[in-house]
Image (cartoon, rainbow, N blue to C red):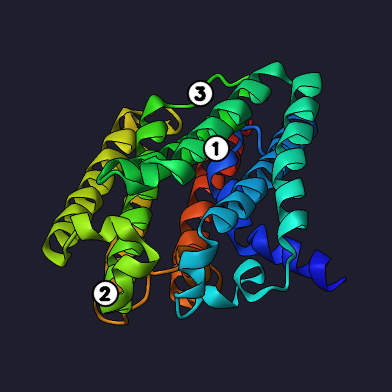
């Protein structure tokens, strides 16, 4: 039971929120959130991605086991601490992705192709790309983009704006660069021992990257709200009403990074920070109102 608990912890249950945030947009923004069959298909796709990403986390921890033992927090993870036996971790890292891909291929071949691509990218990251400056953060971003694509290929999508791909990718890159920046600051002189790629970064570069990506994320989202045909009334795109929530969320996250010293673990911030949760909830509820409720109200006889 202890080994099983360690295995589940190594699969990062808190990270599973990524599959909700990045797999479901196609369902939501295409107006199919309350349709049972599309909802179940996207949910099952998210479950398969959870299994695939869990196997990647196990593989990452196997590759980094010695580095993690030198990390002040990561040394308590199941593998470096000895809670999870290495042979069990290796067996799971090999069999779990094979089973996941086979299930996906039998159910939806397009999703299987996405999962295979995701696994190839993650393996390349674990063994090589994590040590290549700039490509390290772009590779992690690609994993988020593939999650969005996974949500698209399992349903028939008619109204999913290409701008949402750009928004999702830039948001992911913003969180990743913020995480790198906080790790660099918090680890200090121990940074190179736990993440050798930090020899190619410094604080000014990471701060400049963070500011550039935050600005690009906001501008891209505004362009999405202008260009999309999701909800219009009197030729005015009502999705512009969601822009204040986005700019607050971006500014608030910068506040958490620069003032509170948080952001090193975006999943923890998302699950614990009440202000950010309220902002995301209001943004989501506004979209639900605009996409699902407002048209019904307008079209009432």
User: Would you place residue 37 above or below residue 276 in this image?
Assistant: above
Q: Nearer the viewer, residue 54 or 94?
A: 94
Residue 89, x across and y down, in percent: 72, 55
Give the image location of residue 138, x and y in percent. 34, 41
As displayed, is residue 41 above or below residue 250? above
Marks 1 and 3, the one that precedes in the sequence: 1
Mark 2 highlights which residue?
185
Q: Residue at x 33, y 34 (%)?
A: 224
Residue 283 shows up from this direction: yes
Mark 2 or 1, which is nearer the eye?
Answer: 2
Under circle 1, the secondary element is helix
- For marks 2 and 1, the one nearer the N-term is 1
Mark 2, Cα crowd under 10 Å, few <14 / some 14-19 / many 20+, is some
**Considering the numbered disc 3 on the image, is that residue within a helix, a strand or a loop?**
loop
Q: Relative to 123, say whether 271 is above or below.
A: below
220 relative position to 228: left or right = left
Left or right of 69: which side holds 130? left
**Mark 3 Cα-neighbour bin, 10 Å: few <14, some 14–19, many ≥20:** some
Residue 111 drawn at (x, y percent)? 66, 25
Left or right placement of residue 124 versus residue 260 in this view: right
- The residue beneath circle 1 is 147
Q: Tell me the CA gap for discs 3 and 2.
A: 42 Å
Residue that carries the numbered disc 3 in the rendered image: 159
Residue 162, by quadrant, is top left
Which of the two residues, 39 or 282, is positioned nearer the viewer here? Answer: 39
Mark before the other along the chain sequence, 3 or 2: 3
**Numbered label attached to residue 119:** none
19 vs 102, nearest the viewer: 102
**Residue at 56% of width from left, 46% of height from top?**
288
Question: Mark 1: few, some, or many residues within 10 Å (few <14, many ≥20)?
Answer: many
Report the side of 61 relative to 109 (left or right): left
Q: CA distance from mark 1 to mark 3?
A: 18 Å
């Amino acid at each position: 039971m202890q080994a099983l608990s360690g295995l589940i912890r190594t699969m990062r249950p808190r990270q599973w929120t990524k599959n909700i945030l990045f797999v479901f947009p196609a369902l939501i923004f295409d107006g199919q959130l309350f349709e049972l069959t599309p909802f179940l298909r996207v949910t099952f796709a998210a479950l398969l991605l959870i299994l695939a990403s869990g196997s990647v986390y196990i593989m990452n921890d196997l590759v980094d086991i010695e580095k993690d033992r030198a990390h002040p927090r990561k040394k308590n993870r199941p593998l470096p601490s000895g809670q999870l036996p290495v042979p069990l971790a290796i067996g799971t890292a090999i069999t779990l992705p094979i089973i996941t891909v086979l299930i996906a291929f039998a159910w939806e071949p397009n999703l299987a192709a996405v999962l295979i691509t995701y696994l190839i990218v993650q393996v390349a990251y674990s063994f090589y790309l994590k040590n290549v400056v700039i490509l390290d953060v772009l590779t992690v971003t690609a994993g988020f983009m593939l999650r969005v694509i996974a949500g698209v290929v399992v349903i028939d999508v008619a109204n999913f704006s290409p701008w949402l791909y750009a928004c999702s990718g830039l948001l992911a890159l913003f969180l990743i660069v913020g995480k790198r920046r906080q790790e660099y600051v918090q680890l200090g002189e121990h940074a190179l021992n736990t993440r050798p790629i930090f020899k190619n970064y410094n604080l000014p570069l990471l701060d400049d990257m963070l500011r550039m990506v935050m600005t690009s994320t906001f501008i891209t989202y505004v362009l999405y709200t202008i260009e999309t045909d999701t909800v219009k009334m009197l030729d005015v795109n009502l999705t512009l009403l969601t822009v204040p929530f986005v700019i607050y969320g971006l500014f608030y996250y910068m506040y958490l990074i620069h003032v509170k010293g948080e952001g090193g673990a975006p999943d923890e911030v998302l699950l614990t920070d009440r202000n950010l949760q309220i902002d995301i909830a209001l943004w989501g509820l506004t979209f639900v109102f605009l996409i699902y409720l407002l048209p019904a109200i307008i079209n009432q006889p």
